Image (tube, rainbow, N blue to C red):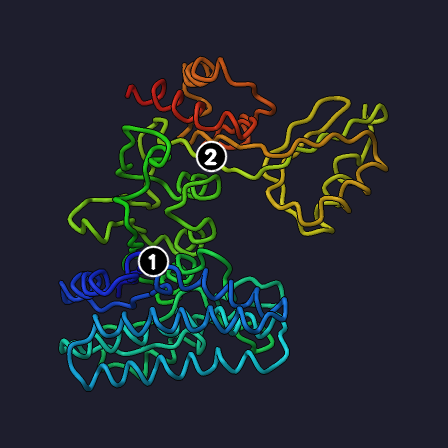
């Protein structure tokens, strides 16, 4: 069985949803299809929740009515029979009735998560109706019946596997299943989610749970590119990546793939294929356990980075200094991206500054602290890239005009990372593209 995931832009318009139906039905493979909300819906739901949080019921109502009008136009274009159009209207009416009820009750975070779940619930129901209308035997598979997270808000893969296997065992007559990405239930049984980009994560978790033959991530771009096509000319899709290379690129800025979505597939050794809904014939990118050629594969950038340097004259031979530093970040559940050390100082970067002020207060007990905001991590990824002769020389030649704040080299065989000010990101990416890929 295959797992196919389609993002919001892939189902965001009726004609796009019809294209997805063609892709889903073009072969005899049994498959689970994971859908995101229609493009723009999650942002609209976030805005509705934001208005409710501010107790601005009038603004929330206006936003709800606007979204309802969008869905009314969508189903009118998507469905051609009166019967299915009536079913679709009843579905949409039910979900928007829930949204209108939120105007009358107290707002809290649990209610906000319920609001955010409405997008995926509607997109999957509408897509299933469309498949039924064109004569496809498809079965809706509610993610809330099997997708679970634990107390740490991490997916419980063992429980997901157990529940999903039991559900599929009762549905032997169907070969195409439609389910929601992103949404789940937490350990309390409340509706929750896998955070932004979580539909990729859902697809990978389902793939691991059923030991899928392949996981396909369909977007509106033909695979993972060697650089950011939004700011760099002459980029190209990468034909093959290892799991480790793909994980580095996803984490350090490649937008096509959610960073968390790699490990479940890697855990089971399931090939992941990145494909283009608009150009389904394009080869895209294959991610697998195979070791690929010893080349620089791609460059990615991660914005919104804060660099923190802790300097202490007592650090020299000070036992436990680094442990104390790391414990502070651990206590505030703030991951560190990069780290460099010297005899008297340690520099780290973070991408989440929620608890920065509290972290700085704790760090100042260990020494002098300096903070640089609005930084960017530039990540060069490949197979054994750090050991290949000439690579480092090419990198620094490309970046000769770029001020470098930090360098992380040798911590991974697949990654060289550098930190610079956000203002130099575009120049750095373009220069690296020209020097490393002969473009």
Residue 83 versus residue 241: which sits nearer the camera? 83
Left or right, 161 with reference to 5: right
Q: Is residue 361 above or below residue 60?
A: above
Secondary structure, mark 1, is: loop
Q: Callout 2 environment at 10 Å: few (<14), some (14 to 19), or many (20+)?
A: many
Q: Where residue 368 sits: x, y (%)? A: 81, 29
Contact check, label 1 and label 2, Cβ < 8 Å: no
Mark earlier in primary sequence (1, 2): 1
The structure residue drawn at horizontal position 52% and vertical position 27%, both measured from the top left corner, is: 423
Q: Where residue 198 sits: x, y (%)? A: 45, 59
The quadrant holding residue 264 is: bottom left
The structure residue drawn at horizontal position 47% and vertical position 52%, both measured from the top left corner, is: 260
User: The N terminus appears in which quarter of the rendering?
Assistant: bottom left
Left or right, 187 with reference to 213: right
Q: Which residue is mark 1?
A: 7
Q: Where residue 399 sits: x, y (%)? A: 47, 17
What label sits on residue 197 in the rendered view?
none
The quadrant holding residue 357 is: top right
User: The C terminus appears in which quarter of the rendering?
Assistant: top left
The quadrant holding residue 164 is: bottom left
Left or right, 191 with reference to 227: right
Task: Please indicate, yes or no, whether residue 163 appears anywhere in the rendered image.
Answer: yes
Q: Where residue 254 sits: x, y (%)? A: 41, 41
Q: Which residue is mark 2?
A: 301
Q: Callout 1 environment at 10 Å: few (<14), some (14 to 19), or many (20+)?
A: many
Disc 1 to disc 2, how far (Cα)?
22 Å
């Amino acid at each position: 069985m295959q797992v196919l995931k389609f993002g919001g832009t892939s189902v965001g318009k009726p004609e796009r949803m019809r294209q997805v139906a063609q892709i889903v039905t073009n072969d005899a493979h049994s498959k689970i299809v994971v859908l995101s909300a229609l493009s723009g819906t999650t942002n609209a739901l976030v805005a509705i929740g934001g208005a409710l949080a501010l107790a601005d019921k009038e603004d929330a109502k206006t936003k709800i009515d606007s979204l309802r009008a969008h869905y009314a136009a969508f189903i009118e274009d998507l469905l051609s029979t009166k019967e299915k159009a009536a079913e679709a209207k009843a579905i949409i009416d039910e979900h928007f009735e829930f949204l209108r009820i939120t105007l009358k009750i107290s707002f809290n975070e649990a209610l906000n998560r319920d609001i955010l779940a409405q997008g995926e619930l509607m997109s999957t129901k509408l897509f299933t109706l469309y498949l039924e209308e064109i004569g496809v035997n498809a079965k809706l598979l509610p993610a809330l019946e099997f997708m679970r997270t634990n107390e740490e808000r991490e997916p419980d893969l063992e429980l997901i596997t157990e529940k999903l296997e039991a559900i599929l065992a009762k549905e032997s007559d169907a070969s195409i299943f439609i389910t929601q990405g992103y949404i789940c239930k937490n350990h309390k049984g409340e509706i929750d989610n896998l955070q932004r980009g979580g539909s990729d994560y859902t697809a990978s978790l389902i793939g691991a749970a059923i030991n899928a033959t392949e996981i396909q991530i369909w977007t509106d771009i033909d695979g993972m590119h060697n650089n950011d096509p939004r700011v760099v000319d002459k980029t190209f899709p990468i034909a093959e990546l290892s799991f480790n290379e793909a994980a580095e690129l996803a984490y350090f800025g490649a937008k096509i793939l959610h960073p968390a979505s790699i490990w479940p597939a890697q855990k089971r050794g399931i090939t992941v294929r990145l494909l283009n809904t608009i150009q389904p014939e394009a080869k895209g990118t294959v991610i697998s356990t195979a070791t690929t050629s010893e080349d620089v594969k791609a460059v990615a950038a991660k914005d919104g980075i804060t660099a923190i340097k802790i300097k202490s004259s007592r650090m020299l031979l000070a036992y436990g200094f680094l442990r104390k530093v790391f414990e502070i970040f651990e206590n505030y559940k703030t991951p560190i991206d990069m780290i460099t050390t010297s005899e008297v100082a340690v520099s780290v970067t973070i991408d989440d500054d929620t608890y920065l002020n509290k972290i700085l207060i704790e760090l100042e007990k260990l020494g002098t602290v300096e903070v640089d905001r609005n930084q960017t991590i530039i990540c060069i990824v490949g197979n054994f890239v750090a050991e290949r002769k000439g690579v480092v020389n090419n990198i620094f030649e490309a970046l000769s005009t770029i001020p470098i704040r930090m360098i992380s080299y040798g911590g991974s065989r697949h990654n060289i990372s550098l930190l610079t000010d956000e203002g130099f990101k575009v120049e750095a990416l373009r220069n690296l593209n020209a020097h490393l890929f002969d473009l």
